[in-house]
Image: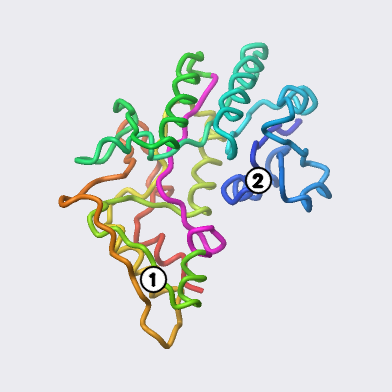
């Protein structure tokens, strides 16, 4: 039996590459890259310039059953690329899209965490971009799409951890937000959860973060304890954006995953023990 063909857009980025590594042993998995030319040596990867290339060519070459979009880059080019992907989806009877979205689609709501079918509203350009693409997908037949909303993603090689390590080494302050209540995830757990959704052929909206909440400042302090090993005390810059606690968290209510795939923020912290 032929393996299902999966195309990951943005497979050279941190999240996209973690997804590729999780899926490539189980599916006929392809990816796109842009700036990191080393991926060109992998015959499963296609060079793709978001602003200059037409995604149609890659879609027609691969003919995937599932497209996972983890694209980054120029916002207008992202919107156009997703319009073309949607046209392709509608021309194929056997193809669906999983779109990696963000907790930022709710960043205008600060008084409570957000669930799958809450109304989206964002004050940030990034959040509004994700909403625009989500709204395009929500007009598709529901079996054609999945919206995967994720909170802050950590991981041993993640940009966030690399930045913290650099700041520690340079004895520079690490920004923390004492009033911000979040949930979190790491690359390994996120990709396992995504693998489950693919295996079960799930569609709809999914919130893939820790099932519990934590203050950003407390979480970063605990992460730093795990990764620092420094002789000097770390420096912190406490940033207050409001006087009251505010939430930026995406919790599941309608589409919960099995217990073995759920994760707590403490497990995310413990994952960073080196």
Q: Give whichever of 118, 33 is nearer the camera.
A: 33
What residue do we see at 29% from left, 28% from top?
Answer: 118
Horizontally, residue 30 falls left or right of residue 229, namely: right
Tag count in the figure?
2
Residues tagged 2 and 1 counted as in contact (Cβ below 8 A): no
Q: Give whichever of 217, 259 is nearer the camera.
A: 217
- Give the labeled residue for mark 2: 20
Q: Is residue 108 magenta?
A: no
What residue do we see at 59% from left, 34% from top?
Answer: 69
Mark 2, other Cα within 10 Å: few <14 / some 14–19 / many ≥20:
many
- Cα separation, mark 2 vs mark 1, equals 34 Å
Horizontally, residue 227 falls left or right of residue 70, namely: left
- Give the labeled residue for mark 1: 173
Mark 1, other Cα within 10 Å: few <14 / some 14–19 / many ≥20:
some
Q: Quadrant of residue 268?
A: bottom left
- What span is in magenta? 144-162
Horizontally, residue 106 falls left or right of residue 156, namely: left
**Residue 234: where, in percent of width, then height?**
37, 77
- Secondary structure at badge 2 equals helix
């Amino acid at each position: 039996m032929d393996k299902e063909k999966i195309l990951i857009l943005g497979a050279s980025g941190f999240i996209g590459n973690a997804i590729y590594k999780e899926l490539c042993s189980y599916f006929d998995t392809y990816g796109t890259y842009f700036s990191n030319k080393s991926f060109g040596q992998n015959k499963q990867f296609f060079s793709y310039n978001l602003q200059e290339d037409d995604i149609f060519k890659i879609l027609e070459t691969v003919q995937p059953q599932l497209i996972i979009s983890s694209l980054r880059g120029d916002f207008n080019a992202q919107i156009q690329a997703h319009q073309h992907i949607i046209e392709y989806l509608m021309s194929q009877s056997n193809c669906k899209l999983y779109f990696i979205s963000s907790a930022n689609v709710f960043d205008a709501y600060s008084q409570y965490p957000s669930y799958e079918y809450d109304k989206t509203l964002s004050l940030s350009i990034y959040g509004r971009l994700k909403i625009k693409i989500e709204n395009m997908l929500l007009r598709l037949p529901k079996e054609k799409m999945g919206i995967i909303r994720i909170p802050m993603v950590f991981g041993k090689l993640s940009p966030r951890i690399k930045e913290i390590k650099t700041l520690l080494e340079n004895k520079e302050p690490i920004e923390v937000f004492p009033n911000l209540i979040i949930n979190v995830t790491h690359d390994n757990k996120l990709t396992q959860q995504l693998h489950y959704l693919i295996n079960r052929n799930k569609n709809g909206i999914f919130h893939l973060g820790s099932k519990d909440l934590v203050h950003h400042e407390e979480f970063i302090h605990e992460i730093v304890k795990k990764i620092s090993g420094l002789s000097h005390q770390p420096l912190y810059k406490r940033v207050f954006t409001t006087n009251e606690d505010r939430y930026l968290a995406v919790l599941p209510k309608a589409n919960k995953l099995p217990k073995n795939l759920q994760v707590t923020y403490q497990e995310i912290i413990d994952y960073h023990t080196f």
